[in-house]
Image (cartoon, grey):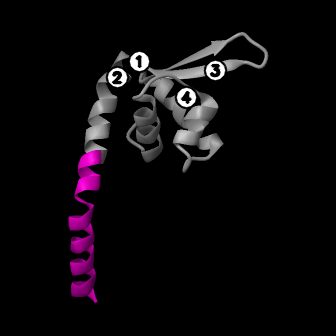
Amino acid sequence: MTGRRGILAMVALHDGTLRFNALRRRVSEVSEKMLVQTLQALERDGFVHREAQPTIPPKVEYSLTPRGRRTAPLLLALIQDVEAQMPEVMEADAAYDAAKG
């Protein structure tokens, strides 16, 4: 869950249940293979629930478990805080690079 892919998947599921392809579109910077592995790890850790319905073709939906619903808002708040600090981070990067120049 601590990896970037896990955080992105959990934040995407914060809004509700998603089928795999919808989740893949929301986490577009992650390959299909890595998303599958990430979802399996999140399911194993108890953050994500996978519901496979016996239809043709199979319908698979992902949602947050109670643990995931407690954690996702914290991750979202962290992302928002980091994004709000980006101008300062860019200034710090420029100052560091100039000093090391």
Q: Which label lies toward us, 1 or 4?
A: 1
At label 3, the amino acid type is Val
**Residue at (24% x, 66% y) in the render:** 87
Magenta segment's dominant SS is helix
Q: Residues within 10 Å of mark 3 (few under 14, many from 20)?
A: some
- Helix, strand or loop at label 4? It is helix
Quarter of the image with the C terminus in it: bottom left
Query: Which residue is disc 4 drawn over?
Result: 40
Are the residues flagged by discs 1 and 2 in contact, CB closer than 8 Å? yes
Separation of marks 4 and 2 at Cα, in angstroms: 17 Å
Q: Position of residue 20 (x, y in %)?
A: 61, 30
Sequence order check: which comes first, mark 4 or mark 3? 4
Q: Dot 1: what SS?
A: loop
Per the rendering, the mark at residue 65 is 1
- Indicate which disc residue 5 carries: none
Splitting the image into 4 quarters, where does residue 77 fall?
Answer: top left
Q: Quadrant of the N terminus?
A: top left
Residue 14 on the magenta span: no
Query: Could you give the CA–CA distance between mark 1 and mark 4, rounded to whole angstroms?
Result: 13 Å
Q: Which residue is mark 2?
A: 69
First to last magenta residue range = 80-101
Disc on the earlier residue, 4 or 2 = 4
